[in-house]
Amino acid sequence: TQLLEQSPQFLSIQEGENLTVYCNSSSVFSSLQWYRQEPGEGPVLLVTVVTGGEVKKLKRLTFQFGDARKDSSLHITAAQPGDTGLYLCAGAWNTGNQFYFGTGTSLTVIP
Amino acid sequence: EAGVVQSPRYKIIEKKQPVAFWCNPISGHNTLYWYLQNLGQGPELLIRYENEEAVDDSQLPKDRFSAERLKGVDSTLKIQPAELGDSAVYLCASSSGQGSYEQYFGPGTRLTVT
């Protein structure tokens, strides 16, 4: 059972378009992570957010942690084919190092 | 620095047969995780080790799954007997566990049970 719901589940867009992926839960997180996974590989960490309302930018990717620390979003500007992959959020409910993963968003960027 | 190593990368077995997966974490990482991942979905935790101690195995189906990390370094996950529904990718990850939140994942073992 995964308590973190991501939307949309699938997303197919043209190169150059913008997109937003959402991660929602009814629980409050102590911290939240976003990972990207390519086919045949394990997930790779993109960012960790720990403060409600926090915004972090990584080149064309912008991550936001909700004020109540129950949700998060990932916005990609001017998507490129190299952004294609499975995007996963993962939340921790205490200060320990156990994160639980969301349902995933599969992104395809068409050249 | 070498990453997390897993073997085999692929395994095809018939149902009711046993299977084992091996993981060697990043050197010095005390925390080791085993996850199960179905296609297009997020990884689901099976077991977490702190050194050689299993600190969270609540999601491990103990009737058929077992794991060990005898010397607190590499780890083995076993399924006996395998069922059709066990077909999935089995991921291993490690972290330093010293205030670091980052998990480093191996490439996974893709298991197909026929």
Image (cartoon, coloured by chain):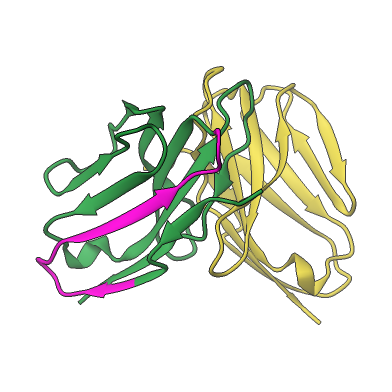
The quarter of the displayed image where residue B108 is located: bottom left
The green one among the chains is: B
Q: Nearer the viewer, residue A82 or A19?
A: A82
Residue at coordinates 61% horizontally, 51% vertically from top-left?
B2
Residue in view at x 71 percent, y 34 percent:
A48
**Residue B100 lies in the magenta stretch:** no
Residue A65, image quadrant: top right
Count of labels in the image = 0
Residue at point 53%, 18% (across, down) = A94
**Residue B3 left/right relative to A108:** left
Q: Where does the C terminus of chain A fall, quadrant-wise?
A: bottom right
Q: Nearer the viewer, residue B51 or B45?
A: B51
Residue at image x 43%, y 40%? B33
Q: Report if residue B12 lies within the magenta region.
A: yes
Query: Judging from the image, what is the letter of the chain drawn in yellow?
Result: A
Q: Which residues are magenta?
A: B11-28
Q: Is residue B9 above or below residue A73?
A: below
Foreground: B72 or B17? B72
Which residue is nearer to you in this view: A87 or A43? A43
Q: Position of residue B70 (x, y in %)?
A: 29, 34
Residue B36 drawn at (x, y percent):
37, 52
The spot of residue A98 in percent (x, y) is 49, 29
Coordinates of residue A60 in the picture (x, y in percent): 88, 54
